Amino acid sequence: MTNHNLYLRLVGDRFEKTASQPFLIIPGRRPLLFSELDRMTGCVAARLLELNVEPGDRVMVQVAKSPESVLVYLACLRIGAIYTPLNPAYTTAEVSYFMTDSKPQLLICQPIERESLFDLSLACKVPHIRTLGSDGDGDLMHGLESLTPEMTVVEREADDLAAILYTSGTTGRSKGAMLTHHNLASNAEVLHSYWHWQDQHDVLLHALPVFHVHGLFVALHCALLGCSTVYFLSRFDTGQVIDRLPDCTVMMGVPTFYTRLLSDARLTPELCSKMRLFISGSAPLLAETHREFEQRSGFQILERYGMTEAGMITSNPYHGDRLAGTVGYALPGVSVRIADNNGNELPRGEIGVLELKGPNVFKGYWQMPEKSAAEFRQGGWFISGDNAIMDQTGRISIVGRAKDLIISGGYNIYPKEIEAVIDTIPGVAESAVVGVPHADFGEAVAAIVVKDGSRQLGEQEIIEPLQGRLARFKQPKRVFFVDELPRNSMGKVQKAELRDTYKESFGSK
Ligand code: MLC
Ligand code: AMP
């Protein structure tokens, strides 16, 4: 049997030529060398085996970005465990849902969170909890050097799960997208080739979080396949990114990264003299940002489009026009069509829902067979929920969303989840949550609330009860009170009207 374990494609024994070079360069810490990667992953794998993690078990990881967190990801692949990362911004209440749903064998959390998560892990019957801090501290790594590294790479079928990534849903309930070894490997290989990765020469500037497709898979997989050194920054800090740009050749980011760079006078063509490629995705890049960035840096940003369930789907070309406001063409091996609400393909030039098929498309949602089936059309087309248009050449533009979703700074926020919590606050009759334009985050969350008259309510009375229940990034940045919500004749809240009414809440653009 061929071993389809993604670990072999990403690490294996591929780093002979770059052995002495750094894989990850981390400010204030010793770099992680390519020569160390296989053995250190083997040590972490040995620790996971000590904790009885078996192939197919979930390992839930809610930690800060660190080189050790990358080792944990690779070690999970190696032993055939299913890596299940979570945003550290999630509250204990949110984590409780993920634990109950995925039933991990092991939870790895930040040392500071151990106390609050310990009882929860007991209640959810999670057998083991370990800690990992941003400096590699915490009990997960204690005494690791004395362990005999586990150097085998467990055999995996192409269809076996490598990771579960939770995405929120329009119903407010998160769904675990099941990604297989082949989903991830095929997408990585296509991107590595489509973006003309310069093996052993590219240097990647990495300032994205590593619990989402963008920073974890797109960025790290390309770097590993290309044996590239990575400047691994804990978060996006404009100053740090500006300091590092002269040493790098590729950067991937959400649109906020680019608007923040534009607001810094140090962004010049000279600063980017070694750069080869700036890539943007996860949220729409404004055409004006694309144009301004070209004027200031000399680079046309390459915009691509993707989602958790399918990794990368389309990309502007490497050679040829990178058109502002478009997301380019279907990647090789990926089929894309624009369809009406019944799944009938529409002629070129008409707006409809983007549907897709390919080796990148996930296996379904964890333990939700009906919900999974409902997202696919006959013939295996996955319904993205994004409204798009395709021109005569096959070039795609995303023009809106069929799903009720806010994307803020590259994070997806489902209004339903926020509304459900706000509606439980005493004094609230009902609420509607919408995304409104925001210069930094692209969209920001605004809540429109109808009071029931039983008590006095101000912005604070709405925000305060959300603490501990919803991650900060999901909480409304503005709250408005109205007598009633606008509804159509069917009684459906008119969110487009609300978005329009409140579009200048964060200043006009
Ligand atoms: C942080 N905050 C946000 C936010 N990020 N609020 C709304 N939207 C966001 N994205 C809030 C914090 O809660 C905090 O609130 C305040 O803003 C400052 O927090 P911070 O941590 O200092 O923010 P910062 O580090 O500046 O982070 C902003 C950011 C970050 C845009 C750099 O959010 C980021 O890295 N986003 C990338 C997300 C990403 O990787 N998405 C890819 C998904 S994969 P307070 O109230 O406490 O002050 C995907 C598929 C695909 O979509 O196609 O790629
Ligand atoms: P996620 O579920 O976090 O993976 O987010 C996926 C969603 O992000 C997609 O369904 C799109 O709505 C959006 N998205 C990703 N890339 C782009 C892009 N380049 N332009 C517009 N929207 C995008």
Image (cartoon, rainbow, N blue to C red):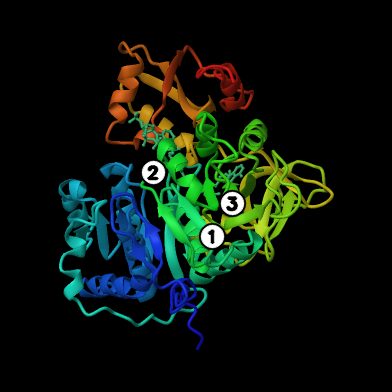
Sequence-wise, which precedes: disc 2 or disc 1?
1
Give the Cα separation between the discs numbered 3 and 2: 21 Å
The answer to whether the beta carbon of the residue marked 3 is less than 8 Å from any atom of ligand 1 is yes
Q: Which residue is mark 2?
A: 235
Mark closer to the observer (1, 3): 1
Mark 3, Cα crowd under 10 Å, few <14 / some 14-19 / many 20+, is: some
Q: Position of residue 152 (x, y in %)?
A: 35, 83
Mark 2, Cα crowd under 10 Å, few <14 / some 14-19 / many 20+, is: some
Mark closer to the observer (2, 1): 1
For badge 3, the amino acid type reads: Gly
Give the Cα separation between the discs numbered 2 and 1: 21 Å
Name the image quarter holding residue 465: top left
**What SS does tag 3 mark?**
strand
Q: Which residue is mark 1?
A: 202
For badge 2, the amino acid type reads: Arg
* Res 306 label: 3
Sequence-wise, which precedes: disc 1 or disc 3?
1
Seen from the viewer's position, the closer of residues 271 and 27 is 271
Q: Is residue 85 visible?
A: yes
Q: Is residue 210 left or right of residue 201?
A: left
User: Which residue is painted at 43% across and 23% down in the image?
Assistant: 430
Q: Position of residue 332 (x, y in %)?
A: 69, 64
